[in-house]
Image: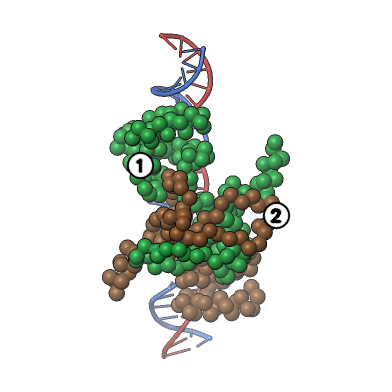
Chain colours: A brown, B green, C red, D blue
Amino acid sequence: MCRETYNEFRRLCQQHNLAATHQRQKIYEALVSRPGHYSPEEIYEQVKQDLPSISLATVYKNLKTFVHAGMLREVSPHHGSWRIDANRHPHHHLVCTHCRSITDLDFDSLAPVKLRVKLPTGFRLEKFTIEVQGICKACTAAETKQH
Amino acid sequence: MCRETYNEFRRLCQQHNLAATHQRQKIYEALVSRPGHYSPEEIYEQVKQDLPSISLATVYKNLKTFVHAGMLREVSPHHGSWRIDANRHPHHHLVCTHCRSITDLDFDSLAPVKLRVKLPTGFRLEKFTIEVQGICKACTAAETKQH
DNA sequence: AATCCTTTAATAACTATTATCATCTGATAA
DNA sequence: TTATCAGATGATAATAGTTATTAAAGGATT
């Protein structure tokens, strides 16, 4: 890990009250040192090259910790189970990043997407989908009730 | 199932060369008769009320069949494994609906999202994410090679 | 009604993820 | 440095979600 990344890692851990362990260091490095959208399994394989005795559960736990702390993000908030949409009309989705509930948002609620550049050659565009991410009413209510 | 929905279902099955079985009818109905973004498990529970002996595998298989035929859509094209994104800069994603690969698209490649209406009260907006869905270069190439 | 081909139910198998718990380690203070 | 201890780790069992297999049943066509 380059010194800059290392320092950033230490700083982030301190900031979030996390012990800066070897495992975390390597997991963090595996993600930030190369572009990509890796799965826990892939990170595990990568980190194992440096720390052969690391456990897959450790990778999962720390990825969760990092995401929860805001040090990393998940690519999509819909992960887990497959969801089917029977709404045939073009529309967008409101997605709660807390409870992951999904609500339809009328297509015309948002101005059409405008492409300012050419897409990579070879990519055959099908459609744009906009996700409006945030905290839903129910989760906001539950949150404020707690305090 | 109302007659209109039933006729549409028959028509869709015919159009896609699918036998119009009771199970398919009920699965289709469970989705289109009420708004929502249901999981296979939820559909299964719903359909079981009418067809107690239906198998969960049948639900999965038919949902896949319907999605593949274009009769229904999946809410999001990436399911499977959890993916982590270490790119701290705001950006969008190109997603291949075939191989599900993910590529970053610079934030400025698309004009900013414009909200034309108020969001539902209580929803606390965090951010907009745009997914650019289509077929990636590799998949297009593989496809044309086949023919 | 007979035939054929598709679909289904049951269930085993598999993949992805989480929980449990004994052991170990990083951070802090002495 | 070393002692201390909360928090982290590794091993693995458990669970959730999904897919594969196969014998039996059902729709479509004749």
What residue is drawn where x is 50% and y is 58%? A130
Q: Mark 1 — on which chain does it sit?
A: B
Viewer-closest of A57 and B13: B13
Q: Secondary structure at mark 2?
A: loop
Q: Using the numbered discs, state the Cα–Cα distance from disc 1 to disc 2 in whole angstroms.
A: 41 Å
Q: From this viewpoint, which residue is outermost toward the right?
A: B145
Which x, y percent locates residue B93?
A: 58, 59
Disc 1 marks which amino acid? Ser
Which x, y percent locates residue B137?
A: 68, 50
Q: Which mark is residue A121?
A: 2
Which x, y percent locates residue B66?
A: 48, 38
Disc 2 marks which amino acid? Thr
Where is B129 relative to C11, above or below?
below
- Quarter of image, res B52: top left
Q: Quadrant of the N terminus of chain B?
A: top left
Badge 2 density bin: few <14, some 14–19, many ≥20, Cα 10 Å: few
Q: Mark 2 — on which chain does it sit?
A: A
What residue is drawn where x is 63% and y is 68%? A33
Which x, y percent locates residue A93?
A: 44, 56
Give the residue at mark 1: B33
